[in-house]
């Protein structure tokens, strides 16, 4: 214990995010109305919206491409009511993201843009209706519509209703006429009460992982399939009505309700730093911008984006951030240039990276710049390595970084996961992940950061584009995979230095790492037994004076590799804390099969 080999990177564990698996829309972003700007593509009709004609009313609906409340939202839903009165209303209903979750005694804040072809159309009624009983959980009315586009705000407050996601939003009118609707939004209470904010349960789950950074926006979502489908950050800030929305490479429309400022506020709410990923002129289907003059506007966009995140309020983009409600700069130390540019077979990345690197370093010498693949001509500060593997591949490669040259760039393992289990990973995957994390900890002088991917999946049918994810949810509930709990354990019991250690005679599927926190005297021994047999250990600590006789043992165990958590059995596998008596610095311990354990000792 008195011979640390190196420090543990304080930013070792973090988060990576992109719009995939309905991670934002239908996930973290608390919006309850699906296809609120009528830009989703469905099979006939208007996706996620349906007509309702009660009694003798008659109505039709269509997308009107010529009417919208803004240049960004230049089309809208036109509802034509040919027959209706106050007792026979007509309108539209929205099904939400696989339902609309309602809780008792809760206020839902809404807004929408609307206009009518005549003042006689009157007011619109908005109601939250239980799918099964037809009863309204809450309802309200707008003022009478006018012939001009106007934004209407409303609140819907539930009473003693049952908590359920089997609800829909209903908008009706009791008069004939043509009504145009757009940007119909409804928000439940959000984490930290942020306007346009995030689901609390998912924020709490992320906080429990003890992350230190968020890579945003990562993955293919940054690139887009085509250049004009990239994450064009300037289209994601400001009033929602000025955000045109865009298609994500995961084949659905992104509302961009979670834009750059919302991402940054997410990091602020979790009290973590941002690893800002900037678009670097290459998109997923192969189009790229050659380095040189044509790349200049993209480099400028990246410089503007960095200024938006960290510039003070005397700068152009820092001033805009302040105008949008956030004068304080955000915490950014790392900027990543692109995503997975090894797939750019034109080999343009060398030139593109160099051009971004020079421009960013000149203006922001304090930033560490990440390359998405190793380079020959420029020496990046950090290289981002990605690993999507089976557990066995991680077991076999746990020593991957043990011999890596320490004089080269630092490493960011910016995407990695054991891909076993669907929609979320199983115990076998948690073992693969935990084994891999022991290797990352042992090499955390080199590996400055690591983030699992993908983080989120909506488990409803059609919600998943990528199997094996960390946190699953539906409209109402969420749960962590066994891998999630392995991450929580490694993140919480991190330590700040790696002592000297060695092992002999262990089984082929046993892995460990040991770290120490020099500030508290705590020692964290992390053990992974991926075997079907128990692993007996003789553990000897030296280089310390006194060990507290009671240690804490945190255990994550499965009965098989296939055992898992799910939306209906969310905590089938979860960590269990017990205490263990320690007979001084030398003691025996047996770790059960299919288990990840952290033994926390206190020694001085
Ligand atoms: O995490 C899913 C995808 O895997 C990411 O979008 C991409 O970067 C990687 O190929």
Image (spheres, rainbow, N blue to C red):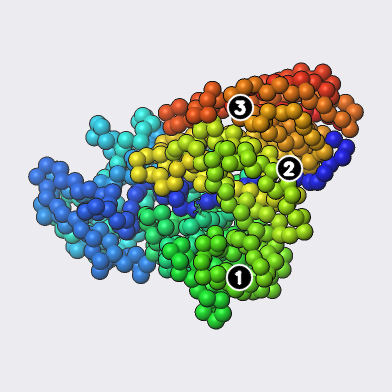
Mark identifier at residue 277? none
Q: How many marks?
A: 3
Q: Which residue is mark 2?
A: 442
Residue at the spot 55% in from the left edge and 71% down from the top edge: 348
Name the residue nearer the viewer: 40 or 454. 454
Q: Secondary structure at mark 3?
A: loop
Q: Which residue is mark 1?
A: 350
Residue 526 placement (x, y as % from top left): 70, 32
Q: Which residue is mark 3?
A: 531
Front tag of 3 and 1: 3
Residue 419 placement (x, y as % from top left): 51, 41
First in residue order: circle 2 vs circle 1:
1
Residue 245 placement (x, y as % from top left): 39, 61
Residue at the spot 70% in from the left edge and 66% down from the top edge: 379
Q: Secondary structure at mark 1?
A: helix
Among the 4 quarters of the image, the one containing residue 323: bottom right
Picture quarter with the C terminus? top right
Examine the rendered structure and indicate whether residue 324 appears above or below residue 388.
below
Q: CA distance from mark 2 to mark 1?
A: 31 Å
Residue at the spot 44% in from the left edge and 38% down from the top edge: 423
First in residue order: circle 3 vs circle 2:
2
Q: Secondary structure at mark 2?
A: helix
Q: CA distance from mark 3 to mark 2?
A: 21 Å
């Amino acid at each position: 214990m008195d011979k640390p080999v190196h420090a543990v990177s304080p930013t070792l564990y973090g988060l990576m995010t992109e719009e995939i698996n309905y991670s934002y829309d239908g996930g973290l972003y608390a919006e309850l109305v699906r296809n609120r700007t009528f830009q989703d593509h469905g099979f006939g009709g208007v996706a996620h919206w349906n007509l309702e004609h009660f009694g003798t009313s008659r109505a039709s609906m269509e997308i009107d491409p010529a009417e919208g409340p803004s240049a960004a939202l230049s089309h809208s839903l036109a509802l034509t009511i040919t027959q209706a009165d106050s007792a026979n209303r007509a309108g539209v209903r929205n099904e939400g993201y696989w339902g609309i979750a309602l809780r008792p005694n809760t206020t839902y804040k809404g807004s929408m843009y609307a206009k009518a072809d005549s003042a006689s159309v009157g007011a619109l009624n908005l109601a939250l209706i239980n799918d099964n009983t037809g009863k309204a959980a809450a309802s309200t009315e707008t003022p009478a519509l006018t012939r001009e586009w106007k934004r209407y705000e409303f609140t819907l407050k539930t009473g003693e209703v049952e908590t359920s996601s089997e609800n829909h939003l209903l908008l009706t009118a009791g008069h004939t006429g043509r009504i145009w609707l757009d940007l119909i939004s409804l928000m439940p209470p959000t984490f930290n009460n942020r306007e346009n904010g995030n689901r609390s349960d998912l924020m709490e789950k992320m906080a429990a992982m003890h992350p230190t950074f968020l890579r945003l926006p990562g993955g293919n979502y940054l690139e887009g399939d085509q250049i004009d489908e990239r994450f064009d950050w300037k289209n994601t800030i400001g009033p929602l009505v000025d955000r045109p929305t865009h298609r994500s490479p995961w084949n659905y429309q992104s509302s961009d309700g979670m834009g750059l400022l919302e991402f940054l506020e997410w990091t602020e709410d979790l009290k973590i730093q941002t690893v800002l990923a900037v678009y670097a002129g290459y998109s997923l289907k192969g189009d790229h911008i050659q380095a040189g003059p044509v790349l200049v506007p993209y480099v400028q966009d990246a410089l503007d984006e960095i200024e938006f995140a960290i510039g003070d309020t005397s700068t152009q983009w820092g001033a805009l951030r302040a105008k949008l409600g956030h004068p304080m700069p955000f915490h950014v130390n790392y900027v990543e240039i692109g995503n997975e540019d090894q797939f750019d077979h034109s080999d343009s990345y060398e030139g593109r990276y160099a051009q971004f690197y020079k421009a960013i370093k000149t203006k922001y010498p304090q930033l560490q710049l990440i390359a998405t693949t190793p380079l020959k001509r420029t020496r990046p500060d950090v290289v981002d390595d990605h690993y999507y593997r089976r557990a066995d591949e991680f077991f076999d490669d746990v020593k991957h970084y043990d011999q890596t040259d320490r004089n080269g760039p630092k490493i960011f393992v910016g995407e990695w996961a054991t891909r076993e289990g669907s929609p979320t990973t199983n115990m076998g995957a948690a073992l693969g992940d935990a084994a891999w994390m022991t290797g990352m900890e042992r090499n955390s002088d080199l590996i400055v950061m690591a983030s699992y991917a993908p983080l989120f999946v909506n488990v409803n049918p059609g919600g998943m584009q990528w199997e094996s994810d960390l946190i699953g949810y539906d409209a109402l509930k969420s749960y962590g995979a066994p891998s999630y709990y392995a991450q929580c354990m490694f993140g919480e019991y991190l330590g700040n230095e790696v002592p000297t250690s060695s092992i002999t005679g262990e089984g082929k599927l046993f892995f460990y790492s040991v770290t120490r926190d020099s500030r508290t005297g705590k020692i964290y021994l992390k053990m992974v037994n991926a075997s079907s047999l128990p692993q007996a250990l003789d553990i000897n600590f030296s280089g310390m004076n006194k060990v507290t006789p009671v240690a804490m043992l945190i255990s994550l165990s499965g009965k098989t590799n296939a055992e898992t958590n799910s939306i209906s059995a969310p905590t089938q596998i979860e960590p269990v804390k017990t205490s263990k008596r320690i007979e001084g610095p030398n003691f025996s311990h047996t770790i059960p099969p299919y288990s990840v354990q952290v033994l926390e000792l206190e020694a001085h």
